[in-house]
Image (cartoon, rainbow, N blue to C red):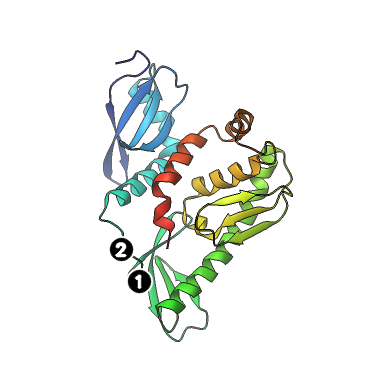
Amino acid sequence: MPDSVKAFETLELLHGGEVITFAVVRSARRKSCSVVIDARGVHIAAPASLNLESIREALIPKLPLLLERNALYQEMLGPPRRKRQFVSGESLRLVGRPYLLRVVAGQDHPVEMHGIHIFVSAADAVGVRETLEAWYSQEAASVFAERVPLWARRLGVTPGRILIRPQKQRWGSCDAWGNLRLNWRLVMAPMSLIDYVIAHELTHLRSADHSPQFWTHLRAVMPDYLERKAQLAQVGSMYDW
């Protein structure tokens, strides 16, 4: 085994009266603790010199992120996702939070949220899908309008328009005029992944291509961008219809 990497250890964290066990992977090259999701599952990457109690203390502020990524991984391990039928009982997500679809008739508004349910009024599955896509696009426009200026300030860039698009092959793009085209499906993902896509596209206003300079700019504002990129690649299909 290389000197830079040590074997797995385990760390138990208490949340809501439940003990959750995570693997800890140490590296001599690592300077701080972070939450990682890869082929091995969700684990904690930590400096080789840090003891378990110090790791536990460092993870307290990151516990919501740790639990979020663990929930995503458990969902990935579940049975293969069936083709969406747009019927009551199917799961939906908004900014990473899970909801249940309820198809009803006679509502004044096509889409309403109550607790863990998203209510949609439509005559058939096609209508449910179209209504949901329009609603998700509106939600995406609202969320992206808040996050784009935040990351633009951090990167020191001035973007153009924010355009919501039903892209099938990409999460976003940025043209030469600084206009951002963002996939409305992205609003289903956790905020950490939404931020990754937005920051990635805005970085093109600092460096047009994916040169080493591009990744240096992105890393400066988002040190864990590689982890977010890997997570999006693994769970992105959950948000496809």
Write down the quadrant of residue 215 in the picture.
Answer: top right
Q: Residue at x 40, y 40 (%)?
A: 63
User: Mark 2: few, some, or many residues within 10 Å (few <14, many ≥20)?
Assistant: few
Q: Are marks 2 and 1 in contact (CB under 8 Å)?
A: yes
Give the CA separation, mark 2 to mark 1. Answer: 8 Å
Is residue 200 rendered to the left or right of residue 28?
A: right
Is residue 107 rendered to the left or right of residue 84?
A: right
Amino acid type of the residue tagged 1 in the rendering: Gln
Query: Looking at the picture, how far across and down is residue 4, in whole percent?
Result: 38, 16
Q: Secondary structure at mark 1?
A: loop
Query: Looking at the picture, how far across and down is residue 205, in whole percent?
Result: 69, 41
Disc assigned to residue 85:
1
Disc assigned to residue 82:
2
Amino acid type of the residue tagged 2 in the rendering: Arg
User: Mark 1: few, some, or many residues within 10 Å (few <14, many ≥20)?
Assistant: few
Q: Nearer the viewer, residue 155 or 119?
A: 155
